[in-house]
Amino acid sequence: MEMKTSSKILSPQTIDKIIFVFVMVFLLSLDNSIFVNQIGYYFALFFIFVRYFKTNENQFPKTGFEVFFILFFLVELVSANVSDYKPNAMENLVKRMLQIPIVYVIMISATDIERGKLFVKTYMTAALLTICVYIGFAYEHFIHHLYSLEARGPSPFQYVMTAGGLMMFTTIFFFSFFINENKWDKKKLYYLFGFLISFFAIAASYTRASWIGTFAGITAVLIFKKKWWMIGTIIILIAAVVALSPDVSKIYKYSFENGKLVKNSEIVTDGKVMDIYADSSKILDADYQQGVKVYNGEKLVGKVELPRPVWSIAKFDDKNYLANLIDSRFLILNYTDSLRIVKTFISPGQTNSFNIANKYFYVFDKDSGLTVFRSMNNLKDTARFVFARDVKSSFVSNTYLAYYTYGNDLFVYSLKNFLPDKLIYSEKINTTLGDLLGDDKYILLSMEGSLKLFEVKNDSVKYILENKEIKGVAQYCIAANKLFMLDLSGNMYSVQYPLINTLQLIDKVKLDFVPNSMQVVGNNIYYGFEKHNRLRTIVDPYWMTNIQRIDQFQTAMRIFKDHPVFGIGDIGVEHAYAKYRAAYEKENFGHLHNNYTQFIVIFGVFGFIIIMWMLIKIFRTNLKIAVDLKDIQFISAFSLGTFAAFIGFLFAGIAEWNFGDHEIITMVWFTFGLNLALYRLYNSGNSKNKI
């Protein structure tokens, strides 16, 4: 009796309903929660097996890709067995193989055309709602000026590169459905709305790899539909955006006259001014593209080219300056009659912050702690403190050292012989900024909504007050009994100095631009200003992430040279990267930000050929389905979207390791599986349309 009851409860029909529910959970969470998404997927897969063992009926359809999936497994297995990190490689092998059945789960659960359409509508609606929420976070990101600070969009649901990749799929699908509709009605307007919202969100993500993929996918749709005039229009619009928003690089000189800021002059530089140092006789321009320049007034009187783009420049002593390159190298520059490089050196790790104080050079490395260089003449005379890791900003005075971490912790140490002695203060303070200012008696912590003041006295730190009039401060300078501060909106504040347990605001001036550097000399204020076109950075050889990708490619080729056949295994490449990277490179990347470079490094030539063969086969299959179903209402739009989104995935993979991103590859297998399912359902019994 009990067995009969149990049989009725878990009848094949009941199991079908359970599978359907979990697949819907999978679809609703594709763009917003990998945890919930995987619950939906694995439970659906589990109950498919339950139904198989209960009915003894094999419901797993043949896709024509079984040979490729087996070969992919063999690639993973062989490379794992020759890897120096076999357990890690085996773990990734299991992950990759567990993702592939998504294709079959979707094909099995899409029992008819109407259910397949429901899956499409559910995914697109849930994705659009998620994108609307993302736009809300992007707005908050914008009003707090975090785009200029972080050069990327928000990450409310997952890492921003992943979010951009997922939104790329949604944007392309909505565009495909919009283009596929012949008449203007409510459906076409809905698809247009979905496309515009998705397009706006992907722009707000600031992820250039996803921009490349979106452009490639949209272009594929237009080529397929032979919309040549639209392709031409898009190219003209992109060219117009690039042309009408040129890169700007200037150095401004202002002075105080009758209590007001008055612009005296400006220097238009050819490159990108990143930082400036000014005194009564000259201006040093740390130009990102062209090295360090020296100006006397508005006249260029000297220049030294550097091996890599420069981030910042600071005065070390009467004749020497310190330049920090984007690869963490430091250069000592001497200026007497001309500017010249005296020395080049590096700190042990990946530099995030540094200070010049007490004739010492304090370098905070994210991964290796604090290194204090006690002499620029003897760079081996150093002191190391491994506790000061993960530092976001720092300040060093004559009596104390303070730093704020990426974990939102403020630490203050007293100094003995100008070296950290004992911890005198620590507090967790949540802010996205966390820039530190100060002098021997006070510490200022910049927050997006305020400025906090702490007093340092007798080896103790005391919180004094929080000023909410002054917020978002990113730069400061002390001169003429005033503390000048500049925020991320271009507001300049002046505060009475020295500070005496208060922040007495004297004046607030709104500039017409947002400087990236500031220097006060007597009655004059110098500003460095640089504005770049984000689209143009995609092909800018000087852009930091482009330089990193070139470095990664060169390192990858060195790894490949030693592991040409089977690679190093499907592992994080940070260990191999540390061994093969250039000596001055500091960061050990866990992946190579390029699918094809990553494939050849982890799988060698053997695996690279097989995986590329598989990707080409998927491309050709998606194209065949799109061609065969081009006249079928609704289904044709999804098949075209799948074809175009896969092209977008391949192009985005030039600048990102999206094949290794769990959320992105889940989307690839889902869309491919549903495409196969709809094709099979529509053509069931039609032998001429076999894949």
Image (tube, rainbow, N blue to C red):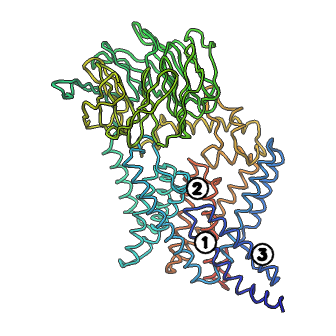
Question: Dot 3, crowdedness within 10 Å: few (<14), some or many (≥20)?
Answer: some
Query: For residue 279, what is the image quadrant?
Result: top left
* Mark nearer the N terminus (2 vs 1): 1
For disc 2, the marked residue is 650
Quick check: can you spot residue 288?
no
For disc 1, the marked residue is 25
* Mark nearer the N terminus (3 vs 1): 1
Q: Is mark 1 on a helix, strand or loop?
A: helix
Closest to the camera, between mark 3 and mark 1, is 1
Amino acid of disc 1: Val
Disc on res. 433? none
Q: Spatial distance from mark 3 to mark 2, Cα to Cα?
A: 33 Å
- Residue 635 place in picture, x, y as percent: 53, 77
Amino acid of disc 2: Leu
* Mark nearer the N terminus (3 vs 2): 3
Which residue reaches farthest top? 337
Q: Spatial distance from mark 2 to mark 1, Cα to Cα?
A: 27 Å
Q: Spatial distance from mark 3 to mark 1, Cα to Cα?
A: 18 Å
Horizontal arrangement in the rendering, residue 172 relative to residue 610 (left or right): left
For disc 3, the marked residue is 49
Residue at left 34%, top 19%? 278
Closest to the camera, between mark 2 and mark 1, is 1
- Residue 482 place in picture, x, y as percent: 30, 23
Amino acid of disc 3: Phe
Question: Dot 1, crowdedness within 10 Å: few (<14), some or many (≥20)?
Answer: many
Cβ atoms under marks 3 and 1 closer than 8 Å: no
Q: Is mark 3 on a helix, strand or loop?
A: helix
Cβ atoms under marks 3 and 2 closer than 8 Å: no
Horizontal arrangement in the rendering, residue 56 relative to residue 428 (left or right): right
- Looking at the picture, tell me which residue is in the foreground, 661 or 142: 142
In the picture, the quarter occupied by the N terminus is bottom right
Residue at left 63%, top 74%? 23
